[in-house]
Each structure stands twice: as structure tokens, then as C-alpha cells.
Amino acid sequence: MSTLWISHRGESHDAPENTLAAFNLAMERNTDGMETDIHFTADKVVVCSHDSITTRTCGVACEIKNTSFEDLRKLNACNGKAEYDGEQIPLFSDALKTLKPGKLFYVEIKVEDPAIIPAMMKEVDAAGVPREQIVMISFIKSIVKQFKVEYPDVKALWLTSFRKDDNGKYHPDFEEIMDTLYDLKADGIDANGLTEHFDADMVKKLQGEGYDVAVWTIDTEEGAKYYLDANVDGITSNCAGKLMQIVK
């Protein structure tokens, strides 16, 4: 099995995250796919942004769910990268247009609103993107579960990070992950690349149970080599295009 390289929010190390520039750069660098995050605007338009408030990326505090798309488009989403001055928060539909045939698009649903599920897939189908190129990801368990009810033919991964309890044990552990994936009917997990807990043994056991295993956000040679050796299905990185050339 060959591990896939996914550009996190596009090639966001070099271009402003979640902009058309970052998505186009991912495709130019020929990574295996790219990742984005989606929100509803006040007028129920699906847009690409990680944060729910635009302060960090645009320098102006607008809460996306309470702002019209027309007003969001007035913001400069260059995220401090002067050479990309004037980049805008894109429509999800426009991001889909940058996706090349055969490439994957990991789409993270950031809001606990089930209405965004059919809205997302309506855009996918309208863009003519084959559903096998879409991987829905979310930390929100209810969203993953509902997505698989509505779109059982589309791959969905449960996103998770890890916490250590007072006894020094990490959660979720293997059994907790398995219980969650079974309950959600998810196709696999997209996990924080914490090698001291989410190790090669856990990867192997999860894949042995038939689940896909992806990791995020891996930006170092050491981390990339570790998870390549662990044979994960996908590595999400801010600099996927460059890193895959270094550690191939």
C-alpha cells in the first residue's frame, strides 16, 4: 500500500490556508489530494475556512455564521503573506473546481448543523466531482454518524486528537477508538500524529479491523518517516508537496 499525501488546507506552508491559491498550489505540486474546512455563512453559503471567526486569517473579526458571503468576500485572506494580497475566502464550489481528476479532497465539516451535509454534497455533485474523490472528516461525532446515514457511498473519517488523564493514560485508547468507529459506522480515523500514543502498532491493529488510518498534521521528516514506516493510508501536511519529495 502506498501512503497518500494530503495538502492541509491546501499547500498552506507557502500559500494562505484555505484559499484558491493554496489549493491550486497543491494540485501543481501533484500531491495525492488536499484538505479544507467548511462553514455556513449567514445566508447558508458553504465557504472554506478553518476558524469560525476571521481574525487570524483576515485581520478582521467576522463570525462566519453571522456574516453574509458578500461581506466575507470583502476581506483579505492573505494571512500575512504579502505576495498573496487580495486572496479571498472561497466558495466551497470554487475550491472543488481546482481539484484534478483522481485527486482526493478531504472536507472537514466544522459546524454541528446537519443541514451542511446535503449542502456540501449538492456542491460536490454540481461540480461533477466523483464521490469517490471525496473524504468527509469531522471531530463532531453526530455529523460523522449522520453523514454515513445520508451518504453511505462516500468515505467518512472520524477526526480525533488525544488527551492524557491524571494517571498518564491517553484517550481515546484503542478500545475507545474501535467503539466510536463502530458506533458512527465511519470508514476510519484521521488522528493527531502523536507517535508516543498513536503508534505503528495501533495503526496496524486498526487497519487489521478494516479501517482506514490517516494522520495530521505532519510537517517534519521524522514524523513523516515514522508514519510512512507504519504504512498509514494518508499523511496530512502543511507542506505535503515538499515533504513527499524529501522522504520518498
Image (cartoon, rainbow, N blue to C red):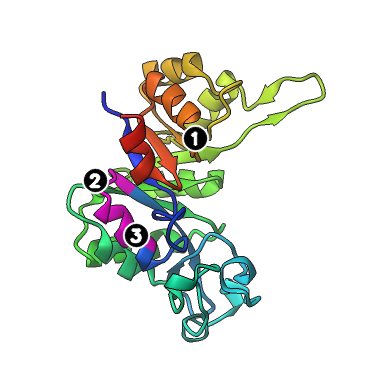
Marks 1 and 3 close (CB-CB < 8 Å):
no
* Amino acid type of the residue that numbered disc 3 sits on in the rendered structure: Phe
Q: What residue sits right under mark 3 in the picture?
A: 23
Q: Residue at x 57, y 80 (%)?
A: 67
Magenta range: 22-33
For label 3, count other residues whose C-alpha is less than 10 Å away and answer few (under 14), some (14-19) or many (20+).
Answer: many
Q: Residue at x 31, y 65 (%)?
A: 122
Q: State the quadrant of the N terminus.
A: top left
Q: What residue sits right under mark 2 in the picture?
A: 132
Q: Is residue 154 above or below residue 189?
A: below
Q: Can you tell which of label 2 and label 3 is closer to the viewer?
A: 3
Q: Is residue 64 above or below residue 188?
A: below
For label 2, count other residues whose C-alpha is less than 10 Å away and answer few (under 14), some (14-19) or many (20+).
Answer: few
* Amino acid type of the residue that numbered disc 2 sits on in the rendered structure: Glu
Determine which of the numbered discs, if any, sits on residue 220 in the image.
1
Question: Is residue 182 at least partly visible in the picture?
Answer: no
Q: Is residue 133 above or below residue 196?
A: below
Instruction: Give whichever of discs 2 and 3 has the lower sequence position.
Output: 3
* Amino acid type of the residue that numbered disc 1 sits on in the rendered structure: Thr
- Provide the secondary structure element on which disc 1 rests: loop
Q: Residue at x 24, y 62 (%)?
A: 125
